[in-house]
Amino acid sequence: MNLYKGSFLLVPGGVVFALAFALLHSSVLHGLTPVVNFFYLAAFFSALVLAWRFHSSRVFSAIIVMLLAQQALRLFFDGSIQMSARGQAVFELSSFLVPLNFLLLAFIRERGFTVRAIATRLVLLGIQSVFVAVMCRPEYAYALQKLFHSATLKYEWLPRTELPQVSLLVGGVVIILLLVRALLWPKPINAGFVWALISLLMAFHSGASGTAATLYAAGAAIIFTVSIVETSYAMAYHDELTGLPSRRAFHDAILQVTSSYTIAMVDIDHFKSVNDTYGHDTGDDVLCMVASKLSQVTGGGQVYRVGGEEFCILFPGRSAQEALPDLENLRALIESSPFRLRGADRRARARGTDRRSVSRSKRPSGRRVRLVRLAGSTGLRITVSIGVARQDEKNAHPNDVIKAADQALYRAKKSGRNRVEMNGTTRTRGKQNAAGSSS
């Protein structure tokens, strides 16, 4: 699902990185080293608190990784122009291990702040810390020299950097993998991992310490912070399953409309029967299919998922009569779009005592539901019922318009489903299924 239509890759992570880059190449920070150090501490503290508060153990672990690397460098850097041999070893190992940790944390499943998840990652970080401490001993100097100072690529192909070639290559490969993941699963946190790693590699590129390294490291923490905020916004204002704006976004949109508007309430016909017969995985697939068709609405309509199998379409500045042809086209589009089952034997066996399953014996008596199959295929015909109402003097408040659209939707259901019904009129669009029901 595409929550930000491509802009999520640049906003906010790219903006934060660009701001840090611009500040470092201007004279604004001249003589403000204490301010930068304070910003560094505040950035990491706020990132840790937000990651903990929003139960993002992956981000929390990534920030701990950055802190360990930065503090290790500061511990072994004595402020001289040339780092000691031990400090150089810590720098090279940190620049090599941090991208690998980012790759691991980005791809593992988020499990919240469980004892098992946190303990496993702390043990892994402890093992790495011991490994770095051991490898910094003089007897391993030759092995490190061979690993980090061998020229894989010609130096003229690379920009001048403090990073060893192997760290630069590993970092580049990890960035590509993280970028692919962000494109396949477009979420703010996934894009945040990309930009945070880029910012942190720029900190290594700038050396072991100094204003540039401190600011880039703080920028990486800020990128994670704003990514958490953006993720929370997406969860609040977008439906995770379908990618459509949610009920909260719908109510905000109504308050921003300055002219009259029309609201259409859309409900999937006999959706509960689909869930009971084929399972909730199939039900989720049906919701996504209907959402993709509804998103093709014309006439300036804005689609929202407001709950369960119910959707809402807002037409700012349009009357119900003007929106009616667009809604009828949507109804016909969904009816003519076959839904293919992923397996012909889905739900062939009982699910047991699943709390969401409903046995045939418990279905309400007097309501006979017959799912419409497509002839010669393992598919279903999905239809929707639509109720339409316009804001006017009688229905001036948004709640009144929603209630009127719900009443029209109820009439559409009662009249046979698979139709469009307008409030305050007997005029309908659509056709009643010959069997008296639809799927």
Image: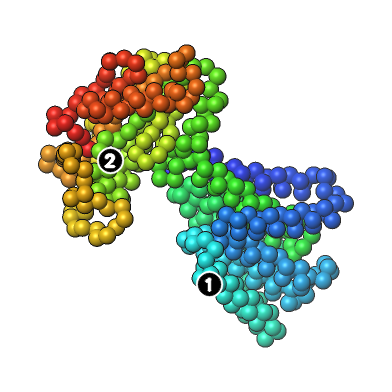
Q: Which residue is mark 2?
A: 271
| Picture coordinates of residue 200, whole percent (x, y) | 66, 58
Q: Which residue is mark 1?
A: 120
Q: Residue furthest front?
A: 365
Residue at 67 percent of width and 51 percent of height: 222
Report crowding for label 2: few under 14, some 14 to 19, many 20 or more residues within 10 A (C-alpha): many
Where is 127 relative to 301, above or below?
Answer: below
> Gap between marks 1 and 2, in whole Å?
42 Å
Residue at 69 percent of width and 61 percent of height: 204
Marks 1 and 2 close (CB-CB < 8 Å):
no
| Residue type at numbered disc 2 | Phe
Residue at 63 percent of width and 79 percent of height: 130
Report crowding for label 1: few under 14, some 14 to 19, many 20 or more residues within 10 A (C-alpha): few
Q: Residue furthest bottom?
A: 139
> Left of 324 or right of it: where is 363?
left
Q: Observer-nearest residue: 78 or 36?
A: 36
> Left of 340 or right of it: where is 261?
right
| Residue type at numbered disc 1 | Thr
Which part of the image, by quadrant, shows the N terminus?
top left
| Picture coordinates of residue 202, whole percent (x, y) | 68, 56
**Residue 93 visible in the displayed image:** yes
| Picture coordinates of residue 284, whole percent (x, y) | 33, 46
Q: Secondary structure at mark 1?
A: helix
**Residue 170 visible in the displayed image:** no
Which part of the image, by quadrant, shows the C terminus?
top left
Answer with the quarter of the image where residue 424 lies: top left
Answer with the quarter of the image where residue 428 lies: top left
Answer with the quarter of the image where residue 366 lies: top left
Residue at 26 percent of width and 20 percent of height: 429
